Amino acid sequence: MEIHVTSDSKYDISVCVLTYRPDVEQLFTTLTSLIQQDGCSYEIVIGDDGTPAFPQKEIEQWLFHHGFTDYTLVRSSENRGTVHNVINVLRAAQGRYVKLISPGDYLYSKHVLADMLHFMEKKNYKIAFGRACYYIRRDDKYYLVNRMNPFHLRPYQEEDYAAAKTSYLVYQDYAVGAAFMGERHLLAAYTEVILDRIIYTEDAIYPIMVADDIRLGFWDANLIWYDYSAGISNDSSEKWRARLLHDSKVTLAIIEERHSDILDFVFASADGKTRDYDAYTRKREAYYAEAQRMLDAGSYLQNIDPGELEKLVHAEVVLKDVISYPVDNFAGTCVCSFVYPLNNLREVLQVVLRP
């Protein structure tokens, strides 16, 4: 995919906050985690997807009160879905890199933007993700969750891009979209590919990138506090599952359009000459059984300082009672955030499976 890059970057990073009917308290906490960043130049672009009575004046007053002026507000007159909201903020952004974030997700500490930027520049990555520290809010306390997407980190830690491609495309072991940062022109180009075809799962661009052999970098440090109890990919209603399943089907169809051999790659038999769906099912089950063993054996949480979250939320963060769920308890339909149940996977693939 040819991407034309121009030298139109005013900032190192554009942090783009995606909103729709936001919890104002969470939005301001997210903004607090942004305006305290140091070590690089950045702007904030707030994109709203048609919220009725959007609190624009309240947001502008908050930013003025905190002395932050490098911001842009982009509002849609109607609700068109997350992908349209993303393309709107990308078109308004002026940073070389873009970090997408939603209310309830917070940058881990005040230096992570600069650290992530320096990592990507040093390694020459166009797209990369960091560690997400998952939390759930219950009553007035915040509980950390022993969780990481992707489950298997070794391919990224060892920069084994072939293994990472297999994990992503064969086993759908995706990195959580909220933990990514990427070059603006790259994100814009791939978002244009999915625009008007995919509605909600903006992070569908990442498996398409992987299929196109774009390397995913992994900054092995804490980048964000991730609200595991929020977001469309955690909505278990039948309506949302149907919507996300549709987006998942379209994502795989786009990959198949660009790479006609993708299903041979995913379902390859031992000799590599035919497709073996039963063998694939066994391999997939073994892959996630190993993920469960890793989850049981230790914690994904590394170098966690609960004080960083407590400074933002002004509430107790419980570290000693870390919550852990079985791997299969995370099965969902969001193409870029969670593991497909095996029965749903076959349904997703029917859109591109040939007799």
Image: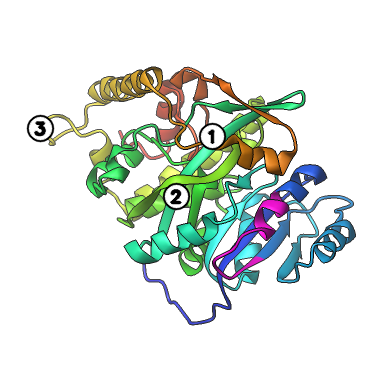
Measure the alpha-carbon separation of dots 1 and 2. Answer: 24 Å
Query: What secondary structure is marked by label 1?
Result: helix
Q: Amino acid at mark 2?
A: Phe
Q: Is residue 171 visible?
A: yes
Q: Nearer the viewer, residue 264 or 30?
A: 30
Task: For the residues labelled 2 and 3, say whether their Cβ atoms are less than 8 Å apart.
Answer: no
The residue pinned by badge 1 equals 245
Q: Position of residue 29 (x, y in %)?
A: 73, 47
Q: Amino acid at mark 3?
A: Asp
Q: Which residues are magenta?
A: 30-43
Q: Nearer the viewer, residue 3 or 41?
A: 41
Select label 1 or label 2 by which is in front: 2
The residue pinned by badge 3 equals 271
The residue pinned by badge 2 equals 129
Q: Nearer the viewer, residue 138 or 312?
A: 312
Query: Which of marks 3 and 2 precedes in the sequence?
Result: 2
Q: Looking at the rendering, which quadrant does residue 289 occupy?
A: top left
Q: Position of residue 279 (x, y in %)?
A: 23, 22
From this view, report whether residue 230 is shown above or below residue 19: above
